[in-house]
Image (cartoon, rainbow, N blue to C red):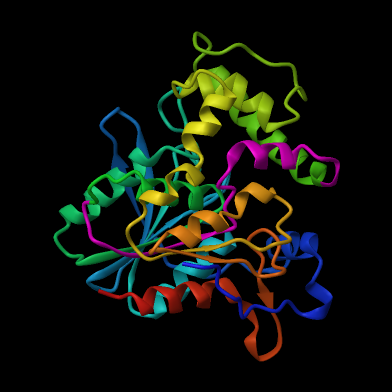
Amino acid sequence: MPGLSSAYRAPFLLRNAHVQTVLPSIMRRKLSVPYVRERLELDDGDFIDLDWLRSGASELVVLCHGLESSTRATYMQGMARVFYRAGLDVCAMNMRGCSGEENRLPRSYHSGATEDLQALLEHAAGLDRYQSVVLIGFSLGGNLILKYLGEGRATPLPVGSAVAISVPCDLASSARRLESRDCQFYMRRFARELEAKYARKVARFPEHFEAWPRGIVRSFSQFDAWYTAPAHGFCSAEDYWEKSSARGYLGGIEVPTLLINALDDPFLSEDCYPEVEAKKSRYLYLEMPASGGHVGFVTLGKQQGYWHEQRSLAFSQAFRR
């Protein structure tokens, strides 16, 4: 499909990419979403925690969060509420170690760890309740679902459609982008969170990991080379990025899939806008609003709220089975 023209127009005072990126995390109130938690035991002895909204629907939406986030993030709660009010059941996945409790193994989650999404869908299929599923992912979670759909594996439930929002689908160039001077604010925040996660791993598994001096992590290149790659069976950070980047799997997608990447997203490089792949695909719809930042897309006035939530719902409804 050719790139879609986008109806999103940022309010005049919110056309700055950094304002769009930061404002929702500061100003958006936590929503009263009555999640019911379930622990899913995995075959390797680890677990993931799932947060459900159930109304007895036959359609399910699965939500996947971004790096070092969780189902408690306001963007996850907002999307969950929109789909639940539209009559779907919702399953929001906390990736390993992101639910408020450390996972059991030295490994964690990463951008290409589609086996946990497969386990979730197998579990949902086993409930013998759902006829189809919608997959929605944000940032890292968006890369995850794009890669999952493009791998060509058999899905336990029929996937009616998918939406991926603000996706660094070329991990290497996105990592370099976040190392640039104008992204240091974001990189410092991620580095603190990732360094703290690693310190907890060292404390629990000293036989596996070497302690790092505080403040040593300053880039994804370092963290992925020192932890992500060896902990998850990759040869190097570059090997991890190459094998886990969704861009290399887009040609294998065979369900209607919407990718929304704002052109001013400070996290994304030019390689994260797969226009060539979208033009060749019958299923991939690429929408590139001029503004919106990273998981921003704020609107004001009568349309107060978040544009990408209603856009995701409308897209999924267009392809309901």
Taking the image as shown, residue 309 lies to the left or right of residue 305, namely left
Q: Which residues are magenta?
A: 156-182
Q: Foreground residue, 40 or 320?
A: 320
| Residue 166 part of the magenta segment | yes
Reply above or below: 305 against 241.
Answer: below
Residue 196 visible: yes
Residue beneath the point at 39% across and 73% down: 316
Give the quarter of the image for residue 6.
bottom right
Q: Quadrant of the C terminus?
A: bottom left
Task: Give x and y (percent) for residue 17.
Answer: 77, 62
Residue beneath the point at 38% across and 41% down: 114
Reply above or below: 179 against 291.
Answer: above
| Residue 159 part of the magenta segment | yes
Residue beneath the point at 71% across and 34% down: 191
Task: Give x and y (percent) for residue 97.
Answer: 48, 37
Q: Foreground residue, 164 or 103?
A: 164
Reply above or below: 271 against 35.
Answer: above
